[in-house]
Amino acid sequence: INRLPPAFEVRCAVPRGKFPKAVSKVNFLMTRENEIGGHKFVRHQRAPQRTIFVERVFDETKTKQILKRCKENGVTINHAIEAACGVAWAQVASLSNEHNRDAFKDPVMVYTAINLRPHLLASPAPDPTYWFLALTYFTLVLPSFPPSSKRAFWLRAKSAKAQTHAAIQSPLLVHRALEMAAERAGRARNKPQPVLNVAKLLNTTTGKLLPGPAPSAALLGLSLIGNLDATYDRRAYPQFVLKDVTTASRQKAGGILFLVHTFGGRLWLQLFYDQEGFGGEGEVNRFWEEMGKCIEEFLLSQ
């Protein structure tokens, strides 16, 4: 057991005193208010979980073209993929009979992770392994309707960039991470979650109900791994030719996760999902097809 790395929570600077703890809690709750999303895949668990994955790979020439296009527009491939998720979903939902058109007044929300290792306090001894997670999560909120032009698409990618930088550069990032870790631990242990007090939604002047909380549904999770050529050093394996990497996805029933990385000069998109957990007829497959069309239209075509 001593060989196991300590939980990241014990290596983060914890706010001391009642006031810093209160500020941390309030800031965390305020970020929750901004997590607005009214779109999700139709889910129906028809049978025991059966996770499969589909993959799309772009050759070196197309990958260079995609990365160049992103750089010209002041974003990374991660920001472009985040924007593309919203665009692909808009195309799927507009052709589906499963979704209420009134819902399109709400934005689409996705979530992704932040690496907390740079924020960990120094360990008295070297970590026995690098196989441990030090992550927290944040959400991105984007329009749910198709963009009117390529310029509009790149504005959405820049919005994803701005939201990402705001989350990563926040001085309260670690505090939010600790609050989120406590909340997720409570859910994992089936602890009762706070219940909205409806009485507080009454306007004390008119006696009428105030608007309730906005919907907060995430479409899917994004795992933006980056350039794996920096992780798998070919010089360490001179007798082997490293051709590709298939990442793994730890999911519960009804889960869906979109992974993006570059390796060997190529861009890889991988979608993991529970094939038995989605009720919309072919909805996930249509989303995957629209993702390919979106990349062709906005990241490859002139």
Image (tube, rainbow, N blue to C red):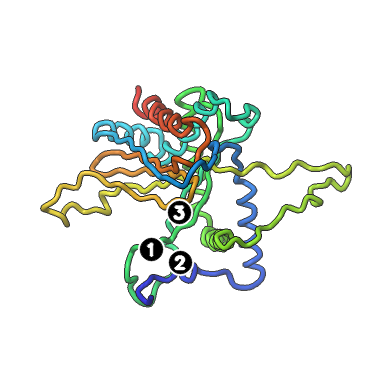
Residue 9: image tag: none
Residue receiving disc 1: 132
Amino acid at dot 3: Ile
Whether residue 164 is visible, yes or no, is no
Q: Secondary structure at mark 1?
A: loop
Give the camera-side residue of 297 and 219: 219
Residue receiving disc 3: 114
Q: Earlier in the sequence, mark 1 or mark 3?
A: 3
Give me the residue at 50% from left, 28% from top.
92
Q: Secondary structure at mark 3?
A: strand
Residue receiving disc 2: 8
Give me the residue at 41% from left, 61% from top.
133
Pointer 2 with pointer 1, Cβ within 8 A: yes
Whether residue 263 is visible, yes or no, is yes
Between circles 2 and 1, the one closer to the viewer is 1
| Relative image position of residue 215 (x, y in whole percent) | 64, 42
| Relative image position of residue 125 (x, y in whole percent) | 35, 76
Q: Earlier in the sequence, mark 2 or mark 1?
A: 2
Give me the residue at 59% from left, 72% from top.
16
Residue that sits furthest to the front in the current view? 47
158 relative position to 246: left or right: right
16 relative position to 294: left or right: right
Circle 1 Cα neighbour tier, 10 Å, few/some/many (<14 / 14–19 / ≥20): few
196 is higher (above) or lower (below) than 24: above
Q: CA distance from mark 1 to mark 3?
A: 14 Å
Amino acid at dot 1: Phe
Circle 2 Cα neighbour tier, 10 Å, few/some/many (<14 / 14–19 / ≥20): some
